[in-house]
Image: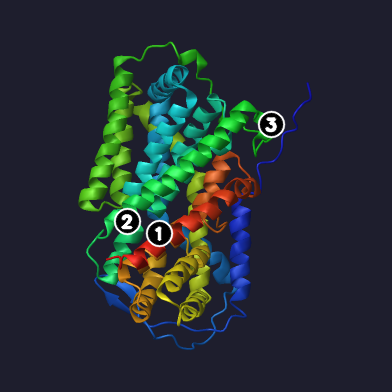
Amino acid sequence: MEKVKKKSSGMNPFVILFAVMLVCAVTSYFISPGAFERVEENGRTMVVEGSFHEVERTPVSIGNFFLAIPQGLVGAASIMFLVMLVGGFVQVYLDTGALDKGISKILRASDKFGSPVVLLIIMLLFSAIGGFLGWAEQIIPFVPIIVSICLALGYDTVVGMASSAFVCMMGFAVSPTNVYTVGISHEIAELPMFSGMWLRLIALVVVETVIMIYILIYAARVKKAPAKSIVYGIDNGSLKRDYSSLKDSRMTKHQILALIIFGITFVVAIFGVLNYSWEMDQLSAVFLAGGLLGGLVGRLGVNGTTGSIVKGAKGAVDGALVIGLARAIQVIMTQGGLIDPIINFFSKSLGGLSPWLAAIGIFVVTLLADGLIPSGSGKAIAIMPILIPLADMIGVTRQTATLAYQFGDGFANMYWFTNGTLLIFLAVSKIPLRKWYKFLWPLQIVLTVIAIAFLGIAIATNYQ
């Protein structure tokens, strides 16, 4: 038998982000400087439409370049700590044996119902997490677990990453109740919170159905002929877990109770987000409490529980640091005066277009802006105050402008290499960026067509 040569899993995400930081810093010495005026409204810093003016150039010095890294880490601290605490939470349930035995039962069910059914259930779960909670970075610790399940089912790492991270992120993209994009955009546009939900619900069903079909087709092909995998030959040994010995083992009552607490933790988190608009700090507290309680119930003891939380947090540090370094790019772009001139150029290019083309233009502008400001909420605050008055002038309803922004922000999240969340999803799944693009581009074309079609529906129905 021919020995398969193990290949590298691609460039380190820190190298990619550092290179982007360097390009942005150099660009700050050449771009025509300009800035918008900003005012405080309801506790948010808002851009004043039509206020763009020339300012003195502020190139990023060598000192400020390196200073941007700790500033980015501080700016992303809340989401970084949440990722680490969720990592600790997951590790507790792995160490109790409850999670592995629960997964083994899922794999046992695949023998009865078929692996495609298990894969579909996984995708529906993560679609709901992204679609109704608006989660993205928060699922990082769960992705390696789903990848290990998919490897055990006979699939590859792409199936594992796509069925969890990609499905979740695209649920985020068309979410009916995404507080980070729809919620903030509605607040800026002075629309009732989460109004116009009917069209976003339809979009969620259509988009996720197309994605799930695409993943299931690819998964079936890989299972039948592993050599057809996009990542064939890439070493994924560290992601494999042996569940076969657990298939016939019984769960103890303590492990059952631990799994119940595991589920309750998510229910509490969902309830808090939907009813009390909980943010990163509150969610961090919930998962810390869930980890502590689960460890004690699972008989890890006080020392064992705290040790598991620390171990899991250590395992999530890489992902947390990538998020912080990605935020450093935004710090450099702000210091170097890059964001406002680029946004001003994009907004001017939409003038004189028909309503449908203008809506598509908002979609495209947001797609491009996502490379500069990956944060959905940060981008909404930066560009929606400009796009909303522009939409009023060209006959596009504010609801349609918000939808175009939401699609542009979400659909770009899984291909912009400046998105630290994407890079860490790929890193923990051992998938090179170029291999991910090979998997993604046919589907991305279809999704773009779907987005444009929904914008056409919004224009035709005078979407409010």
Secondary structure of the residue carrying numbered label 1: helix
Specify which label sits upstream in the sequence, 3 or 2.
Answer: 2
Q: Is residue 62 left or right of residue 131?
A: right
- Name which residue lies at 55% across and 33% down: 219
Left or right, 353 with respect to 445, comes to left
Q: Nearer the viewer, mark 3 or mark 2?
A: 2
Between disc 2 and disc 1, whose residue precedes?
Answer: 2
Please tell me how crowded label 3 is: few (under 14), some (14-19), or many (20+) other residues with Cα within 10 Å.
few
Q: Tell me if 244 is positioned left or right of 40 in this view.
A: right
**Residue 454: mark in rendering:** 1
Which residue is drawn at the image coordinates 30% and 38% (left, top)? 266
What whole-number distance in Å separates the C-alpha atoms at marks 3 and 1? 37 Å
- Give the residue pinned by disc 2: 199
Decide: few, some or many residues near mark 1? Use Cα within 10 Å; few <14, some 14-19, many ≥20.
many
Is residue 448 in sight in this rendering?
yes
Label 3 sits on residue: 227
Q: Mark 2 and 1 residues: CB-CB less than 8 Å, in contact?
A: yes
Q: In which quarter of the image is the N terminus?
A: top right
Considering the image in quadrants, where does the C terminus appear?
Answer: bottom left
What's the distance in space between the residues labelled 2 and 1, CA to CA? 8 Å
